[in-house]
Amino acid sequence: MNAMLATAIVLGAAGSAHCIGMCGPIALAVPSPGPSMRARLGSTVILNSGRLLTYALLGALFGTFGLGLRVAGLQQGVSIAAGAVLLLSVLVPRALERWSSTGRLSMAIARLRSALARNLKRTAPEALFLTGVLNGLLPCGLVYAAVIGSAAMGSPAEGALFMALFGMGTWPALFAVRMGGGLISNELRSRIRRAAPYLVSTLAVLMILRGMELGIPYISPPPITVPADVAACH
């Protein structure tokens, strides 16, 4: 597997403590359509599937942006710059969250939260799925880090896959919270929280290496060259 894609899964898993704090209350606030464990499990799958769809669509969008950069010959420089931004976010905690603090974006986020609040008490499958979709759009520094990684993938499909794998990495912790908060101890949460900066830093270094095109298989592929006979045809 591509090193960046493998990192996406681990990034999601290592960011689980953050996800518990951000998305856990929403997961707990959504009522189960029935008292049985099966009903609760089914609603949890639907809820998280909506969130996963949002992440995949964001990945496709940013992957398309990365593809445009590749065609323009700019992706390598942007990949290095994006890696540097991620390292900065580790050194300056909450730096990425500040992007959404003012202006029209903050108004859009307020409306999103209102829509989410109105939908929270509904238990129909489509309502649970919509709640998950809206949940995935809420501002989150960890998601910002992941979408930067998806842009570095350089294609819509790989960008969507990167974000889907990131989302899957967050599933175990959020499933455990919704099915029974006691399944995750405070000690485990603390360990996961301490690991998150190292994983973000690893993703940042991989992005920088990817942009440098050092010829390292799976990590820093060499630049794509056009054969002379093909170039001559143009």
Image (spheres, grey):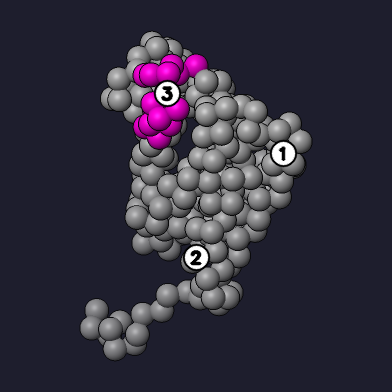
Q: Is residue 186 left or right of residue 222?
A: right
Residue under pointer 2? 2
User: Residue at the front extreme?
Assistant: 36
Q: Which residue is drawn at the image coordinates 30% and 25% (left, top)?
A: 125
Local crowd size for mark 2, using a 10 Å CA cut-off: few (<14), some (14–19), many (≥20): few
Q: Amino acid at mark 1?
A: Leu
Residue 194, percent from left and from top: 75, 42
Q: Is residue 88 left or right of residue 177?
A: right
Q: Which residue is drawn at the image coordinates 61% and 27% (left, top)?
A: 181
The residues tagged by marks 3 and 2 sit, at their Cα atoms, a distance apart of 40 Å
Q: Secondary structure at mark 3?
A: loop
Task: Kindly report which numbered mark, 1 or 3, lies closer to the viewer in this rendering.
Answer: 3
* Residue 31 inside the magenta-drawn segment: yes
Residue 110, percent from left and from top: 46, 15
User: Residue at the left extreme?
Assistant: 233
Residue 116, percent from left and from top: 41, 17
Q: Which mark is residue 36?
A: 3
Task: Kindly report which numbered mark, 1 or 2, lies closer to the viewer in this rendering.
Answer: 1
Q: Amino acid at mark 2?
A: Asn
Q: In the rendered structure, which segment of residues is drawn in magenta? A: 29-47
Q: Which residue is drawn at the image coordinates 62% and 41% (left, top)?
A: 15
The residues tagged by marks 1 and 2 sit, at their Cα atoms, a distance apart of 28 Å
In primary-sequence order, the first of circles 1 and 3 is 3
Residue 75, percent from left and from top: 47, 59
In primary-sequence order, the first of circles 3 and 2 is 2
Examine the image and state in which quarter residue 48 appears.
Answer: top left
Residue under pointer 1? 188
